[in-house]
Amino acid sequence: MYISQNYSYAILRPLQQVIRAHGGEVKWFLEGDEVNPDFLAENEQQVFDIKDVIAWQPHASFVPGNVIPSFVPGRKVAVFHGFDSGKRNRRGHLDHFNIRGCFDLYCTQGPSTTTRFQQLAQQHGFFRVRETGWSMLDPLFSPTPNNPYSSTDSRPTLLICSTFSKRLSLAPVLVERIKELRDSGKYRILVQFHPKMSADIVAQYKAMQNDSLSFVETDNVIPLLQAADVMLCDTSSILLMFLLLRRPVVTFNNQAPASHLLNVTDATQVEAAIDQALTRPPELMANIESFCQQLHPYQDGRSSERVLAATNDLIISDGAELKAKPLNLLRQFKMRKKLAYWRW
């Protein structure tokens, strides 16, 4: 399990459980200083040095991020750190479909992304695509026992999430409006931001905490999502996970507004949109259902099994039909430098 962010634990643990149930062995490599080793459980093994990863000779590496060094042995499997939320890179291309030449297999989440990745696989020829569903969502459709975010509070629970990008984030723009929502006393508010959110913004929201608003830091957002009635978000892909619970989302300046969202562009419209969402308008809920069938149709909690089956098939067949991956010399040099690994 090759990870660089704390949210990756929750993405890969359902997959780890399935691998172990099939008699496999799992180890974790934590790249960089943005992932906290304290989140590892007692029964999870950490490999501390990239040299030890190579010596262990893994059959496959599972990556919820964008890159993995080519010198790590075994097949490299992309399992994604979120859904396609419509974010575009500096060149104007959808970032979710950026092919960086690192992976042998992409395990896609549903028809809305599978089709495009299949087109890219035909174009490039060095990776497979299999639609499996997303391993992180296996626990989503089962209640979390003793959910720490559940409450006997009779008020509706509003979950506020935001991306870290200054250009897209609602967090700095809606500070005063969210204070007003808190002070209204109408909602129980939970706030959770992307781990890369500016420390100054995080501090502002932590300072808002009282009986109506709590700031949450967690490596597993699923219990948090399950505890909420409605979400206020921007263009963060976490809103797509919330929609899969068939619950409404109000977005602020979303990059790709559509009929399954209640999108507003003015801070003064936020409260009315939240109240409208809480009524669960029939047309909106029907649009959400249609959207979910394209995004992630699997509600059986067995996506991890499909990921493992696709990976085993690749290992057994040795990917005989695949071309060699591009050398990516500059990227590989940077990764060798970052990991202080210069052996060949």
Image (spheres, helix red, strand yellow):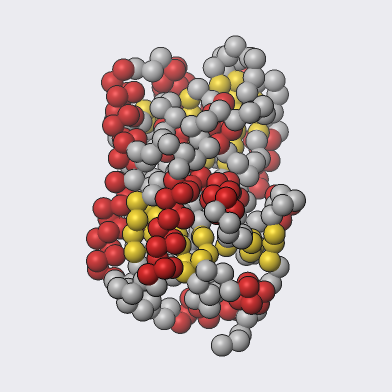
Q: Position of residue 235 (x, y in %)?
A: 43, 42
Rendered image quadrant of residue 101? bottom left
Q: Position of residue 303 (x, y in %)?
A: 44, 46
Determine the residue located farthest toward the top in the rendered image.
154
Q: Position of residue 43 (x, y in %)?
A: 72, 52
Nearest the viewer among 31 and 199 is: 31
Nearest the viewer among 274 and 222 is: 222
Residue at 30 percent of width and 73 percent of height: 321
Residue at 54 percent of width and 74 percent of height: 72
Q: Position of residue 160 (x, y in %)?
A: 54, 32
Relative to 188, residue 119 above or below: below
Residue at 61 percent of width and 60 percent of height: 25
Is residue 83 shown left or right of residue 48? left
Relative to 300, residue 77 above or below: below
Nearest the viewer among 227 and 303 is: 303
Residue at 64 percent of width and 19 percent of height: 151
Relative to 28, residue 281 above or below: above
